[in-house]
Amino acid sequence: MANKEMEVVKGVDLKRYMGRWYEIASFPSRFQPKNGENTRATYTLRDDGIVNVLNETWTDGKRGSIEGTAYKADSKSDEAKLKVKFYVPPFLPIIPVVGDYWVLFLDDDYQYALIGEPSRKSLWVLCRQTHLDDEIYNQLVERAKEEGYDVSKLHKTPQSDPPPEGEEGPKDTKGFWWIKSLLGK
């Protein structure tokens, strides 16, 4: 099963995909805080077609964040295969770390999405709202299973309603767990 090429969404309108997405569930990474909550990603399209990425999570009331960029892996392809690049935080040598971001499912209204990558070590269920209907969630899980993911590893991310405001909360400097979780290390 795992050898079969994953089916990736074609013809994603990046402009419509921009904005904030809440993490409903993901494969935990050993670098990610076990108790991270309100995890979310905000995407902004630049004039040059590159996407600015801001990932945020809250742990024990502290906001951790990391910024990066995303771009199409192959500009000629209409497949939604992106590369995401983060820079390791400044107190280390600045090394760009690149991961894959494949959109495996996206509804017509761009309200929920299933994101994976070729090694199948990372999986994310994203939604525009802090809550995703169980029926839809189960359909996405089923879809991931069909693509060869071990869905037993999916962990639901606690989201508060309403979500925390943007920049509030003390900073958490351990932001680089994002990168490691992205690389599935």
Image (spheres, grey):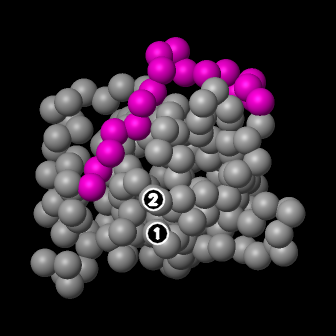
Please state the horizontal and vertical placement of residue 77, each as a whole percent of the image.
Answer: 45, 76
What secondary structure is found at the residue carrying circle 1?
A: loop
Please indicate whether residue 152 sits to the left or right of residue 111 in the image: left
Residue 55, percent from left and from top:
62, 46
Label 1 belongs to which residue?
184
Residue at 23% x, 38% y is: 137
Residue 84 image-quadrant placement? bottom right
When the figure is inspected, residue 66 is found, relative to residue 165, above or below; the finding is: below
The amino acid at mark 2 is Ser
Kind of residue at disc 1: Gly
User: Up-down: is 55 above or below 49?
Assistant: above
10 Å neighbourhood of mark 2: few (<14), some, or many (≥20)? some
150 to the left or right of 38: left
Image x and y of residue 171, in percent: 77, 37
Query: What residue would you read off at disc 2?
Result: 29
- Asked if disc 1 and disc 2 are in contact, CB closer than 8 Å, the reply is yes
- Name the residue at 21% across, 63% down: 150
Q: The N terminus lies in which quarter of the figure?
A: bottom left
Q: Is residue 11 visible?
A: no
For the residue pair 101 and 47, the one nearer the viewer reads as 101
> CA separation, marks 1 and 2?
7 Å
Residue under the image location 76 percent in, 76 percent down = 95
Magenta span: chief secondary structure:
loop
Name the residue at the bottom extreme: 3
Membership of 37 in magenta stretch: no
Task: Name the N-terminal-most of marks 1 and 2.
Answer: 2
Report the span colored magenta: 153-170
Task: Decide if residue 6 is in sight here.
Answer: yes
Residue 156 magenta: yes
